[in-house]
Amino acid sequence: MSLLRLSRAALRSLVVGAAILTATIAGSTTADPPAMTITFTDRPLDGVVDLHAQGALTVSAFTLFFDDSNSFKVPQIRPSSGDLSFGPGETGLQDIYDVPVGTVPAFGTNTSSVNCSGFSGDLFKPSRVNSSVDSVYVAPDYMDGAPIDSRMTCAGSFASLGISGDPLSMFLPGEQRVDYVFTTTAAVPLPAALWLLLGGLGAVAALGRSRRG
């Protein structure tokens, strides 16, 4: 009897231990949500790529390089250097923060700057300024945790703009991750009934011409 009790107690311990281990593994493999997401949407039918940056940052984890810098910020991209300039296309103030070299990832092979349009929202720009510094530009007096929501549109496609389309992430100081997401909108096929309708109209038109002839 005592041996049976011991076996049952050991079994219960094994079950509890396995449950704890499973929960621990599940918790360790669940990624924290990104601080920001930058979504690239290739729209072949319209011949454009839409960009949307959304989220929030803790800039106090960065190194302030220039407070209230006054310069011109045009909406543009340069894939090979990771430049994503969500800017108003006019001279204005901005705060510039330095982050470790290699933080800002390249998202393609094109080495030329491509001007974009349709900017709306908040000033935001991750950039490889040069070989010794990467920077993040935000609106002047940006406060930690304030929402960033920026949009712009570039003429072309992933292929013509030299955008790789491979998912990647930027890891900023303060354990902040910015995910790059790439999507393509598919052409919407015409419904089968519409093709039948068009075919019927064509047949009626042909019949009308034959009668007139």
Image: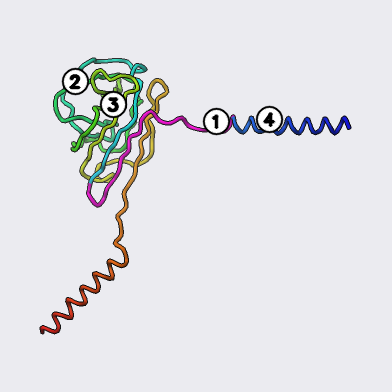
* Left or right: where 207 falls relative to 40: left
Which residue corresponds to mark 2? 93
Separation of marks 3 and 2 at Cα, in angstroms:
20 Å
Task: Return the x and y of residue 115 as percentages of the image width and height.
Answer: 18, 36
- Residue 116 position within the rendered picture, expressed as x and y whole percent measured from the top left: 19, 37
Per the image, label 4 sits on a secondary structure element best described as helix
Q: Magenta residues, as a range?
A: 24-47
The verdict on residue 39 being magenta is yes
Tell me how far mark 1 sits from mark 3, CA to CA: 34 Å
Residue behind mark 3 = 128
Task: Give the labeled residue for mark 1.
Answer: 27
Q: Quadrant of residue 124?
A: top left
Sequence-earlier tag: 4 or 2: 4
Q: Which mark is residue 88?
A: none
User: Whole-Å distance between the Cαs marked 3 and 4?
Assistant: 48 Å
**Callout 3: helix, strand or loop?**
strand
Could you tell which of marks 1 and 2 lies nearer the N-terminus?
A: 1
Compute the Cα span from label 1 to label 2. 42 Å
